[in-house]
Image: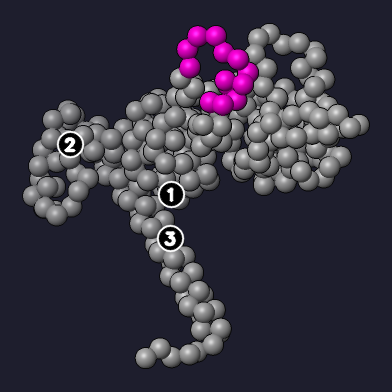
Amino acid sequence: MAIELGPSYGVLLEEIKYDVADSQLRARRVLVGELVGLYWRIGRRILDRQAAEGWGARVIDRLAADLKEAFPAARGFSARNLQYMRTFADQQPDPAIAQQAAAQLPWSHWMVLLDKLGGDPERQRWYAAEAVEHGWSRPVLTHMVAGQLHARQGAAPSNFPATLPGEDSELAQHMTRDPYVLDFIGMAGPLRERDLEDELVRQLQRFLLELGTGFAFIGRQYPVRVDRKDYALDLLFFNWRLDCFVAIELQLGDFDPDHAGRLAFYTAWVDDQGSP
């Protein structure tokens, strides 16, 4: 027989559910950080002993076999993973790495950074911090590294410093990229602008990922009416971090000053509307 407890019971249930989920998330973060710290310490010990004793790479195979015997139920002590630990400690020699935000990055993500950015510890830390902040999956991290996001982010020419307040200008500039990489568009042969628009909308999830953090899709061919004339804005987005709309006008071919004028027309209209 169901017991009627009133609306306050629903509030209690939601509070407990939120608390449990939050605790689970914090526990996972602690576990990830502890694992990364453990792997760094193991790698550091291997490096130090090899240097002191003159041991070669074969000691890693011996360690893998002995650790498997000592901890038969544990995973992560293969010779390959021990080599990753050694490389991790070698390329990130500062023990403080285990206390930084980068320590919250899952070990599988660190393996990507060690493979793709070997010998560039500063860039490894940059991508690690970005991945933690934005919650990138391993495939997304791999995509961002391959697309050289570090070189493109914040590089687009803009008038933000002259038109936006200081903090807003810095955030807006940080979120722009030059160029945007749209290699997920698998289209061959001559393209029309509408073909490009169709494909971007079809691949919307990947397009949003390339645009950056905080973008929400509002619509395509968004109706614009000015002086009783009808126009259509190719793509309209909203960015919750900037708290503003982002208009995209698609053009193929070489740049023409008319393109900038048309985009300025649309952005001025969006500004006048306040909200679409």
Question: What percent of the width, then of the height, locates residue 191?
Answer: 57, 13
Q: Mark 3 or mark 2: which is in front?
A: 3
Quick one: 216 or 180, which is closer to the camera?
216
Confirm whether residue 47 shows in the render.
no
Question: What percent of the width, then of the height, locates residue 134?
Answer: 52, 44
In the image, which residues are magenta? Answer: 187-199
Can you identify the residue that label 2 sits on? 79
User: Left or right of 166: which side holds 93?
Assistant: left
Amino acid beneath label 1: Gln
Residue drawn at (50%, 9%) of the image: 189
Can you identify the residue that label 3 sits on? 25
Amino acid beneath label 2: Ala
Quick one: 232 or 168, which is closer to the camera?
232
Question: What percent of the width, then of the height, locates residue 255?
Answer: 72, 11
**Which corner quadrant holds the N terminus?**
bottom left
Can you identify the residue that label 1 sits on? 104
Q: CA distance from mark 3 to mark 2?
A: 31 Å
Which SS class for mark 3? Answer: helix
